[in-house]
Amino acid sequence: MMAVRIDGKELAKQVRKEVSEGVKCLKASHGVTPGLAVVLVGEDPASQVYVRNKVKQTEACGMNSFHHVMDAGTSRKSLLSLIKALNNNPAVHGILVQLPLPAHLDSRDVIQTIDPAKDVDGFHSSNVGDLWTSGKSFVPCTPLGCLALLKSVEPNIAGKNAVVIGRSNIVGRPMAALLLNESATVTIAHSKTKDLPALCRQADILVAAVGRPRMIKADWVKPGAIVLDVGINRVEIADGRGRLVGDVDFEDVSTVAGAITPVPGGPGPMTIACLLANTLEAAKRAVS
Ligand code: GUN
């Protein structure tokens, strides 16, 4: 039997609808419009696309968007002073600095300057610490979206074996924390993991966040497993044109998995929807 296709576009639409309603309520009850500041340093083409989508969707759900573009040579001092100004601006409830930053800027240093109450990316060490100790943190948007996709097909995560491939601060680590908070038994795999296919075959829930096109094949996957594919890789097809594929070989793995996210149309759309939900939450906390 072919795997169920988990529709990230559809779920993201529902989340955005709920956020739009929440924004209307907050305006009516407190006269406050949630505001999200997005900071882009440099001209990375992929980051430009992501930021444009974030700005567009922020405005579409009735929030204010503050879009700051700085040139690639921006100094640490200028970037930190912009962040401090945004921290002190009451119209800004969420701050997102698009990553990666140019090499001369230390992303950790930059993230630690963001007020944790406005850190809607959930990257500040205070929010990371909260996530690992079951506190009320902002959770990074991609893993938060993945968890919602997972719950849409399997509400009972407790006791399941989960394997997360990738140990990044943006996806792998927070994904593992979220699954652990749901009482899954979690393994984080990475480039030094021995016999990765054998480890993956034990997973009831498999999350791929490695950045290697179609690395995961059907014989890596336990029959009936739920597979979440966070990879977004551009591969060349005929006559030099590109196409986006995940870390999972979708057609192959669909023959054994119980459910699987497509690329595009899986975790991608959910990431921005969760960013909007976190921004609304930040604004609600600011008025309460
Ligand atoms: N770059 C890739 N994903 C993300 C994300 O979720 N947040 C930020 N700030 N940068 C990213």
Image (cartoon, rainbow, N blue to C red):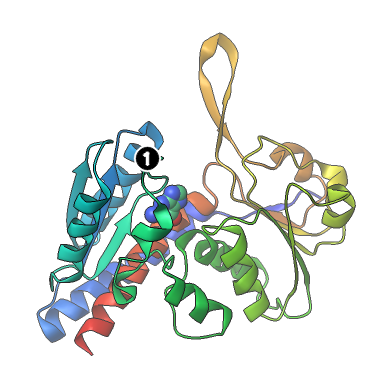
Relative to residue 129, is residue 226 drawn left or right? right
Residue 272 or residue 153, whichever sits in front = 272
Residue 223 or residue 208, whichever sits in front = 208
Determine whether the residue tagged by mark 1 lies in a helix, strand or loop. loop
In the rendered image, residue 6, in percent from the top left (x then y), is placed at 61, 55
At x 31% / y 65%, what residue is drawn?
Answer: 113
Residue 280 visible in the snapshot: yes
Q: Amino acid at mark 1?
A: Pro
In the rendered image, residue 139, in percent from the top left (x then y), is placed at 47, 71
At x 52% / y 22%, what residue is drawn?
Answer: 242
Relative to residue 120, is residue 244 drawn left or right? right
In the rendered image, residue 114, in percent from the top left (x then y), is placed at 30, 67
Relative to residue 129, is residue 206 drawn left or right? right
**Looking at the image, which residue sits at the far top?**
239
At x 25% / y 61%, what residue is drawn?
Answer: 61
In the rendered image, residue 155, in percent from the top left (x then y), is placed at 65, 76
Residue tagged 1: 102
Determine whether 45 is above or below 256 in the image.
above
Residue 222 visible in the snapshot: no
